Image (cartoon, rainbow, N blue to C red):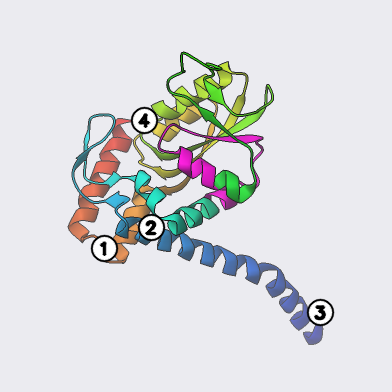
Amino acid sequence: MLGEKWQWQLLVMIMCIYLPVAVYCSSFIDHKQALIKQLYHCGAIRVENTHIKNGQLSPIYFDMRAIISYPVLLHYLAETMQSMIAELNFDVVCGVPYGAIPLATAIALRGNYPMIMQRKQVKSYGTQKSIEGVFNLDALCLIVEDVITTGSSILETINVLEEGGLKVQDVIVIIDREQGGVTRVQKQGYTVHAVWTVSEIICVLRDAELITHEHYAVIKQFCTEQAANN
């Protein structure tokens, strides 16, 4: 049996190892929750009936393009995403055109990562490239997207990049709308990392009294129905 002195020393050692980790995790969660509130206040998160890309009428809408007008918010969002991808293996980053390009740029600048850009429409003059930037064949590309709904835009971008000689393993998105997109992309062999799901976002907004319990229930039901249908 350890003496009382050694028991206290062992306890201090354990606290020195695990307490900073616990504090970091707690502060990271608080940081992410604060970001959700800022996104709501700047209009990037809107609780209103809006038609989304797949034609459905959604009770919540994510206008992530609004963040380009808020450089501090864009910086902190890129910081959050960069911390999530720090351990991933990739050589270059590419934002899904065109909404995610500013976000990919912010992440590339923060992490000092090389960046490439996929063109939706290839020019009929000049180099006529479908992929802009410098990269090696078989280089690993990290895909950056703002919101994933069905995953079709992500898969379209991956297809162009792979045809151009790149490889893709990971995708990072700000928001997973929980409408089957993540499952669809991962079935193709790619891993999707999301900063938030819709469910996580509306919990924070409800607890902060930024949306009513009625709005929360409507959005939650919508998410549940979409998950069941996909």
- Residue situated in front as seen by the camera: 215 or 9: 215
**Circle 1/circle 4 CB separation < 8 Å:** no
Numbered disc 2: secondary structure: helix
Q: Which of the marked residues, 1 or 2, is nearer the chain's N terminus?
A: 2
Q: Report whether 191 appears left or right of 198.
A: right
Q: CA distance from mark 2 to mark 4?
A: 22 Å
Numbered disc 4: secondary structure: loop
- Residue ID for mark 1: 210
Q: Which of the marked residues, 2 or 4, is nearer the chain's N terminus?
A: 2
Residue type, mark 1 in image: Leu
- Residue ID for mark 3: 2
Q: CA distance from mark 3 to mark 1?
A: 53 Å
Q: Which of the marked residues, 3 or 1, is nearer the chain's N terminus?
A: 3
Q: What is the magenta range?
A: 81-106
Graded by Cα atoms within 10 Å as few (under 14), some (14 to 19) or many (20 or more), the crowding at tag 3 reads: few
Graded by Cα atoms within 10 Å as few (under 14), some (14 to 19) or many (20 or more), the crowding at tag 1 reads: some
Q: Which of the marked residues, 3 or 2, is nearer the chain's N terminus?
A: 3
Give the farthest residue toward the bottom.
5
- Residue ID for mark 2: 36
Residue type, mark 3 in image: Leu
Picture quarter containing residue 37?
A: bottom left
Residue type, mark 2 in image: Ile
Q: CA distance from mark 4 to mark 3?
A: 58 Å
Q: Is residue 19 above or below residue 62?
A: below
**Circle 1/circle 2 CB separation < 8 Å:** no
Q: CA distance from mark 3 to mark 2?
A: 48 Å
